[in-house]
Amino acid sequence: MTKKRLAALSGTAAFLGLSAALGLVAQQSDILIKITKGERPVIAVPDFRASGEAQQYMGAFNQTLWDDLEKSGVFRMASKSMYPLRVPQQPKDAEPGRKIRPLPRFAIRESNGASVSIVGPGVRCRNIKIGDPVTLVLGRQRDSDRDAIVQVSVRSDGASWDCTDSGKGLVTREAADDRRAKVFVDRDLEVGIDGEAWIGSHSPKVGEGVRFRVTENRKTGRRDLFAVEPGPRPDADVKMTTGHLKRNPKGFAFVDDAFVPPFMVETVPPEVDTVVAVLVYAKHPKEDRYGWRAVAISAA
């Protein structure tokens, strides 16, 4: 057996907590596939399922998807005889009694000063709390460009969250049912946060300013928020205004040229014309332009 040699280095980090493997997959909205020269990669595509009346169309959908990938000339399709009998598509589909192994996650500072997160499969984090400063020993195989966490130890001379960046935001959606709360960070970024990320003494309220710690997922480029709590509103792209509510027969309205969605207009009694509004300057959801929109309004 040939032993692969490791190049090791030590560095500072902050412990971000444990993430369930299936949970991580579910939160990623984009998948990046890189094709390099050589033999075509093999791809496994299980049949997707739907609920209710939509299930009757899934046979045609799955067959069309399979045919398109197979005829693309880019992939080789793995035989379905090699698939497990039951393919989980969301965390609750996992087999009863089967434990999903959590992945310890850490924030580190790269040489350019950027805060990025990495995971350490198999790493034990006993007696380490979320946000604690730690020292990581990273190893890299000589023939690989991927870092592996070899050892984790508490760093007594550090401060909590010291390998993450600080930021300010505005709550634009409260958590409800299966929906996560949302935080507006700037005109190009609005982030969903899990309940574990909120450390305030009360539930986040729409229009409320927050402070947080943030790091970037090295693989996906997504920015994740931690230690979110009430704080000041951002200085840019957010403002409060008192103005006339210009109602439209279709249900929406405007305040100082800022769009107010119908569900928000319905919270204001018909006889009220003057409102106080919390506005954000953000990208239009369907058009390539920016503009002001209301995230909360109330009678003045």
Image: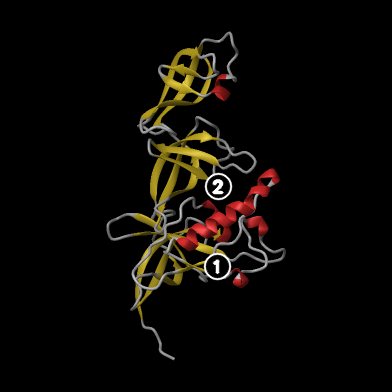
Residue tagged 1: 126
* Label 2: how many Cα within 10 Å (few below 14, some 14–19, many 20+): some
In this rendering, the count of numbered labels is 2
Q: Quadrant of residue 264?
A: top right
Three-letter amino acid code at the position of disc 1: Arg
Three-letter amino acid code at the position of disc 2: Asp
State the image coordinates of residue 137 (x, y, percent, origin top left): 40, 71
| SS of the residue under disc 2 | loop
Along the viewing direction, whichever of 185 and 109 lies nearer the viewer: 185
Along the viewing direction, whichever of 3 and 262 lies nearer the viewer: 262
Estimate the spatial distance between the alpha carbons at disc 2 and disc 1, rounded to whole Å: 23 Å
- Left or right of residue 258: residue 122: right
Name the colour scheme. secondary structure
State the image coordinates of residue 198 (x, y, percent, origin top left): 54, 44
* Label 1: how many Cα within 10 Å (few below 14, some 14–19, many 20+): few
Q: What residue is rendered at 36% in x and 33% in y?
A: 288
Among all residues in the image, which is located at the extreme bottom? 1
First in sequence, mark 2 or 1: give its number.
1
Among all residues in the image, which is located at the extreme top? 271
**Quadrant of the rendering where the N terminus is positioned:** bottom left
Q: Is residue 18 visible?
A: no
Tell which tag, 2 or 1, sits nearer the viewer: 2
> Do the residues bearing badges 2 and 1 touch, measured as CB atoms within 8 Å?
no
Residue tagged 2: 194
Q: What residue is rendered at 39% in x and 71% in y?
A: 138
State the image coordinates of residue 300 (x, y, percent, origin top left): 51, 14
